[in-house]
Amino acid sequence: MSDRDDIVAHAQTGTLPVLFVERLRRHRRDELGDAFRATLTELHNNGTIDVLEPAKNIASSPIDQHQFFTVMHIYSDLIPSLEAEVPTMLAAVKALTARAGDDGASGMPNGAFRTWAEQGDRAKAMLAAVDPAAPEDSAYVFIGLQALAKSDPTDALTRSLAYLEGPHAPSRSAAGKAIGTFALATSEARDTAVAALTAAAPTADDNSLGHILTAICEITRAHPEIAPQAASLINASIAQVGDQAIHQLSLELMFHGEELGPEIVESLTAIMHKVQMASQGTLTNIDAAASKLINHKRLDEALALVSPLIAAHDALTSMETLDGTSFALRQLPPGQLAQVVMGWLLSAERNLGAATLALAGDHHGGAPLIVDIGDTALALDDADRILLAHRAVGWLFIHSITAASLLLGLLKGASEVATHAILDILFDPLLINYSGELAECLTERAKTAAEPEQAAIANLLTRLEAYIEGLRKAGRIKELRPSERERLIEQHRHHRSMQEAHNAAEKKSVFLSIVSRSVLLYGNRSISYFKGPDGRTQRNEMKLQTFSHSIESPRLDILEPFDLDYTLRVFRAMRKAVP
């Protein structure tokens, strides 16, 4: 049976979608698929069959959802070349998008429909066919205006302004969104659009306001000369924006923030600071926007975007929600990363201190994170150096090498008084608690360090040897040794703590979400069987290997845990003295 006969037979029985799946599932982009679609288009356009009828009834089609998306892709290919009345095509496209639901590909038929509507007077007919007051028709007002702008941009702008000034919220929202996509080739058109958007903003609902402000950003992106007017409109709307508008503007900042001027980014940043912690999608967009700004060498603007949010919301201090920003910051050159760390610690904001700790904890690699402040320290006065040293140890205590690298950098250009204060903090509580890895790191650093850092490190190591020797002289004091019961209690507490941390880590594991778990009760190898391509069972043997990990515990966490905890809390809360 030829393609033509097969298509006609299935059209008569109402099973065209089933035929689409059978014939085009693996041939959508090859010659067979092209020939099949050409035959479909020809038969529809000469009136032999109605390809759109099955689309209008797709909700009741027996095909499953996976097969439906194959059918939807085929209709998206066919629609631009089909001849049909606007109401018929509109009904078919609506039915396809309705069955697609919230899937990311659900807008494909609308894209094809826009291409179809750009031909002849179809855009005007479509705008006449849709209901401007119906929320479900808002997308088609937008599509119609975009299609009309291809052939008659003046009429498209005029109709958009009429919708924008009209009484129906859905069409106002669509019109505001559409204006942002118009070319606006003349200064008169731009002035008219900007004036209309400015006039509509004060009384707009939140969804429409989001589209209006996004439109002014898009116009500014294409025509930077209107940036002052755009910034003025955005700033005037800050008190008015709600969750929907904030989300729409977060998308604009995420996709195009690096193309917008500083004054527009500053205005959008002020709006982003109103985001609610429950709006996780918006926070994800803000994170992506900040990371893009960092990658485009606009670090100060990225920090202005995220730092106040972190300072205001405890939920962001772990940097998990802002993981893209955290990664981008860790990729910065050492000098810029040091400036970020110093700025957050000197801000005296508790949440920014906690974010600095998270930033250091997210560092991965064979070596600890080194904060190399270089000549940046020369701009600090002694009071700031001492404050920064205290807050660095307070927040980065568990990352001793990271904290020590920052403190050693503060020695450059410091007075004698500040130098002694910084070295005292580096020794106690940092070095006496981490006399293993940190002492080894300082020993290696002293080999290449210049004066006065080399002498300072030598002095620190000498003091450490004397301190440890003093501890040894006391020997074992029987009365201070914990009892067997106390040791068992502590072992149980430690085991339970480690197990809880292990379980929490497993929940975030990518690998455990895609593989199954097997527990080996004995032996030193794992044997499994699987079927190869030829159907034969094959044996797979995997020998088990050992691995280990160690972590150095702070010495005073055992000797004087309460005193150590109090000291670190004081360091974190320290502020600069006010004269």
Image (cartoon, rainbow, N blue to C red):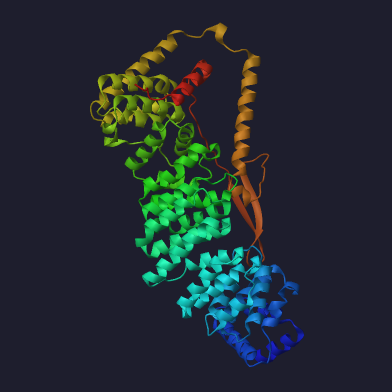
Q: Quadrant location of residue 183?
A: bottom left
Q: In which quarter of the image is the N terminus?
A: bottom right
Residue at 35% x, 38% y: name it.
Answer: 339
Q: Split into 4 quadrants, where in the image is the C terminus?
A: top left
Q: In this view, does 551 lie to the left or right of 335?
A: right
For the point 40% across and 25% down, the residue is 390
Query: In terms of depth relative to the viewer, which is nearer, 528 or 123?
Result: 123
Number of marks in the image?
A: 0
Judge whether 14 appears above or below 246 on screen.
below
Q: In this view, does 534 lie above or below 552?
A: below
Give residue 250's position: percent from left, percent from top. 50, 54
What's the residue at 31%, 29% (across, down)?
A: 410
Of the pair 492 and 327, the residue shown nearer to us: 327
Q: On the rendered structure, is 170 left or right of 311?
A: right
Quarter of the rendering containing residue 139: bottom right
Identify the residue at image location x=60%, y=68%: 138
Pick the front one: 362 or 515: 362
Which residue is situated farthest in the left direction here? 451
Quarter holding residue 77: bottom right
Instruction: Give residue 416's position: percent from left, percent from top.
Output: 26, 20
Tell me, yes or no, if residue 458 can be seen here. no
* Residue 531 coordinates in the image, percent (x, y): 66, 61
Q: Is residue 465 left or right of residue 254?
A: left
